[in-house]
Amino acid sequence: MNMTPSKSYKDATGKIDYTMTNDYMFRAVLQENKKVLTGLICSLLHLQRCEIKSVIILNPIELGKAIDDRAFVLDLKLMLNNAMILNIEMQVLHQDFWNDRSLLYLCRAFDNPDKGNDYRTIKPAYHIGILDFTPFPEYPEFYATNKLMNVTKKYIYDDRFTLHVLDLNQIQLATDEDKAYRLDYWAKLFRAKTWEELKMLAENSNIDTDMLDETCETIFRLNQDDAVRYWCEAREDGERIMLTYKNMLAEKDSALAQKENEIAQKDLELAALKKQLASLTAQLNQR
């Protein structure tokens, strides 16, 4: 018996094939729907909608088309109000080098004066990492703000240079301010794995209902797009391959460390035997 296909996320049930933690789906939803993108920016930067006059995507991709080398990293680079540069990324796979990479991306965004202009024209730069891992496990935080600061006097060296981290694993640490800007709902929306979870969020959310509906409908529509699905699957396959190689390397490192420990133990045993032999030899020479 054929089932009638769902026409809306409100009718859909079960697992979401590609959620917004898939970086291609994340990019596709935000590039496809400017209202959703604007709503997310407002929450991340603690702005009101009336404060956002324009959002320009500086690195657009053609959705469903082949990803070239420049688009392999699917971060969104934006110009906000023609006055600041904003880089947003979704990163699920744990990267030991993420701190270095995010800082490099922020520095590139800060290097923005047009040719012929002086340093006073540099625009504020923000890099925002939405992560499904905790970059500093010893300092867990839901929404962290990092700036260049004098370590002795504790003053901000330059307020135009900011790196934010939204940790999807630390929603329980959301502050009252985080909740006031509805960052906890965004995090739950990103992590939602079923259509039922999305519908429950929509019913209990204090986010703009129309905007949340548009977000969910855009996720639903793009999940039906074969070309978009192809690249979402390709990104998941790529991450799976990277994770496999990482685990294989870790296993080899573990096996090598075990062998080195065994050799070290054998060396200790050999040294003990040599010492014992030397002692016996000395005793024989005394007779």
Image (tube, rainbow, N blue to C red):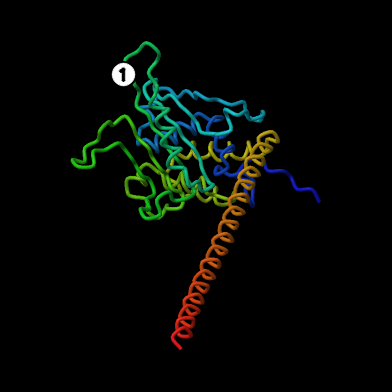
Is residue 202 at least partly visible in the picture?
A: no
Residue at the bottom extreme, as displayed: 287
Q: As drawn, is 91 to the left or to the right of 239? A: left
Measured as percent of width and height from the top left, residue 202 is found at: 50, 46
Q: As drawn, is 65 to the left or to the right of 107? A: right
Question: Which residue is more in the foreground, 113 or 60?
Answer: 113
Q: Please name the residue that numbered disc 1 is placed on.
A: 119
Please give the name of the residue rendered at 43% of the width and 24% of the height, measured from the top-left corner: 79
Q: Of the residues shown, which amino acid type is indicated by label 1?
A: Tyr
Residue at the left extreme, as displayed: 153
Q: Is residue 10 above or below residue 27?
A: below
Residue at the top extreme, as displayed: 116
Please give the name of the residue rendered at 41% of the width and 27% of the height, measured from the top-left corner: 109
Is residue 21 at least partly visible in the picture?
A: yes
Q: As drawn, is 251 to the left or to the right of 51? A: right
Measured as percent of width and height from the top left, residue 150 is found at: 23, 38
Measured as percent of width and height from the top left, residue 136 is found at: 40, 51
Q: As drawn, is 125 to the left or to the right of 255? A: left
**Secondary element type, mark 1:** helix
Please give the name of the residue rendered at 42% of the width and 53% of the height, measured from the top-left corner: 170
Measured as percent of width and height from the top left, residue 214 is found at: 54, 36
Question: Which residue is more in the foreground, 116 or 6?
Answer: 116
Residue at the right extreme, as displayed: 1
Question: Which residue is more in the foreground, 82 or 271?
Answer: 271
Quarter of the figure with residue 247: bottom right
